[in-house]
């Protein structure tokens, strides 16, 4: 019990970093998802192509490989990123690619009649997207984005491997100095659970709210 | 910058390490297919404390990072005098983590079985075990197999995490090459390309399988709906074909 009290402050410091990274990457990858998702639905072949390549490459390779590539391989091109920047860019590009598919499929899931109706009402492309399609597509996206957020939170643990002092990093650090591996790694698991579980309850709540009157 | 000679010289080492990556992915997949089924069955148990406990375990494993779970297995179990090789620890961690995802897949398959099938099993005086293994599972599992394929690919992409507990798979080999030669660009790029070359075609294949499966089930439904129509039109059709 006493050892927990000694270990906890340092771990909580790491937990704050973990939450920070999660929030920043979540917001940025949300934008990335929309850019790439719209890119894949673009009228122009080249934009569609670029978006597809980006999505398939980042979904087809491993997040850890992407992270290490950004952190260790980019310096050979003379571009040395600070660990924090490399970590966030890797998370944003990876989860942006997964999110892009969510955006695309949600927009395609809006019934075709809605598009035809807005053309019949003489709405411009932009108005159609903003007033008719997106409000419906967003409802479809929400639960999946929520799940992705939880996945993102868990994936932030990987940034500890490029020396960012997040929750996992603090745990490993304490383990090498105090050797109390049972207590430390149990605490780590519990802390991650404490952060993630309210999120997954929230996602379930949203899912129920969104499906009201639809099931 | 990019040095082709160096890249080609390290390729054999990385390809060899790829075998370890692949065997880790396949071993953990087999483990998670079995444990996932046990989780799914346990969660439906009539004995409530068991169902709740398993539900709690699944929820907990799903909500915590795989990397920390790997550290837990690798560093904590030796304290209780269970010493595992890095590979075994990695396979158990990866397999256990994904078994919780697969148990949800099983669940969706089982939930899709109509209630009448259970009742029919009871009416035929089958034991619960017989109902599960002769009626429910043979119908529940085949439709979800493409989803399993998806998880195999996802699992394959998570194997680099095993390098954190010193399994010498592709990522670890690339790291070792990098630290020996001070060249990280080539090894890490090759690892990325190898992952893509293996996972992208498999993902396309799984998507195709899934699409075909959806089409089949849709056709089945259509014939069910259209059966009456066919039955009504059949005599005339026969008559016409005879006359021709």
Image (spheres, coloured by chain):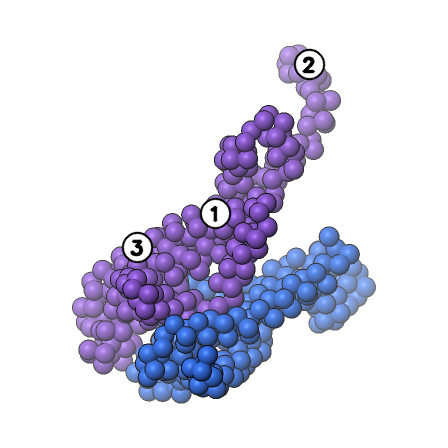
| Marked residue nearer the N-terminal end (1 or 3) | 3
Residues A203 and A97: in front is A203
Q: Is residue A6 left or right of residue B9?
A: right
| Marked residue nearer the N-terminal end (1 or 2) | 1
Secondary structure beneath disc 1? helix
In the rendered structure, find residue B189 and report the number of the disc placed on it. Answer: none
Quarter location, residue A66: bottom left
Could you tell me which residue is drawn at 19 percent across and 78 percent down? B180
Could you tell me which residue is drawn at 46 percent across and 75 percent down? A187
Cα separation between marks 1 and 2: 52 Å
Quarter location, residue B164: bottom left
Chain in purple, by letter, is B
Could you tell me which residue is drawn at 42 percent across and 82 percent down? A3
Cα separation between marks 2 and 3: 61 Å
Residues B140 and A170: in front is A170
Q: Nearer the viewer, mark 2 or mark 3?
A: 3
Q: Is residue B136 left or right of residue B158?
A: right
Q: Is residue A31 above or below residue B39?
A: below
Q: Are marks 1 and 3 on the same chain?
A: yes
Question: Chain A appears in which tint?
Answer: blue
| Marked residue nearer the N-terminal end (2 or 3) | 3
| Crowd band around label 2 with a 10 angstrom C-alpha radius: few (<14), some (14–19), many (20+) | few
Q: What residue does disc 1 label?
A: B37
């Amino acid at each position: 019990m006493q050892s927990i009290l000694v270990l906890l402050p340092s771990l909580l410091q790491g937990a704050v970093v973990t939450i920070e990274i999660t929030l920043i990457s979540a917001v940025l990858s949300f934008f990335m998802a929309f850019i790439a998702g719209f890119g894949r639905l673009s009228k122009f072949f080249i934009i569609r192509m670029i978006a597809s390549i980006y999505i398939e490459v980042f979904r087809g390779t491993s997040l850890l490989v992407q992270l290490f590539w950004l952190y260790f391989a980019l310096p050979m091109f003379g571009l040395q990123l600070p660990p924090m920047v490399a970590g966030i860019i890797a998370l944003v590009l990876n989860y942006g690619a997964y999110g892009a598919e969510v955006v695309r499929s949600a927009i395609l899931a809006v019934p075709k009649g809605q598009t035809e109706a807005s053309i019949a009402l003489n709405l411009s492309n932009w108005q159609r997207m903003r007033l008719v399609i997106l409000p419906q597509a967003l409802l479809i996206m929400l639960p999946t984005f929520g799940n992705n957020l939880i996945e993102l939170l868990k994936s932030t643990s990987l940034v500890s491997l490029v020396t960012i002092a997040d929750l996992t990093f603090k745990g490993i650090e304490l383990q090498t100095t105090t050797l109390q591996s049972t207590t430390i790694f149990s605490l780590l698991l519990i802390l991650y659970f404490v952060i993630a579980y309210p999120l997954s309850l929230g996602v379930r709540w949203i899912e129920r709210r969104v499906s009201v009157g639809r099931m | 910058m990019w040095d082709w000679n160096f890249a080609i010289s390290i390729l054999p080492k990385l390809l060899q390490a790829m075998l370890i990556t692949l065997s880790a992915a396949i071993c953990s997949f087999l483990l998670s297919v079995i444990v996932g089924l046990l989780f799914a069955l346990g969660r439906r148990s009539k004995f409530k404390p068991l169902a709740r406990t398993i539900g709690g375990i699944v929820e907990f494993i799903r909500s915590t990072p795989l990397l920390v779970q790997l550290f837990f297995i690798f560093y904590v179990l030796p304290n209780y005098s269970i010493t595992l090789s890095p590979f075994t620890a990695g396979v158990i961690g990866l397999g256990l983590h994904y078994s919780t995802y697969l148990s949800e897949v099983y669940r969706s398959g089982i939930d899709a079985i109509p209630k009448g099938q259970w009742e029919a099993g009871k009416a035929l005086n089958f034991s619960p075990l017989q109902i599960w293994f002769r009626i429910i599972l043979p119908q529940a599992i085949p439709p979800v197999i493409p989803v399993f394929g998806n998880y195999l690919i996802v699992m394959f992409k998570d194997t680099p995490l095993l390098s954190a507990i010193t399994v010498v798979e592709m990522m670890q080999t690339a790291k070792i090459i990098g630290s020996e030669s001070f060249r990280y660009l080539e090894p890490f790029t090759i690892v990325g390309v190898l992952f893509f070359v293996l996972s992208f075609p498999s993902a396309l294949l799984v998507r195709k399988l899934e699409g075909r499966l959806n089409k089949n089930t849709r056709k089945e439904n259509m014939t069910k709906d259209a059966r009456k129509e066919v039955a009504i039109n059949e005599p005339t059709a026969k008559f016409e074909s005879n006359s021709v």
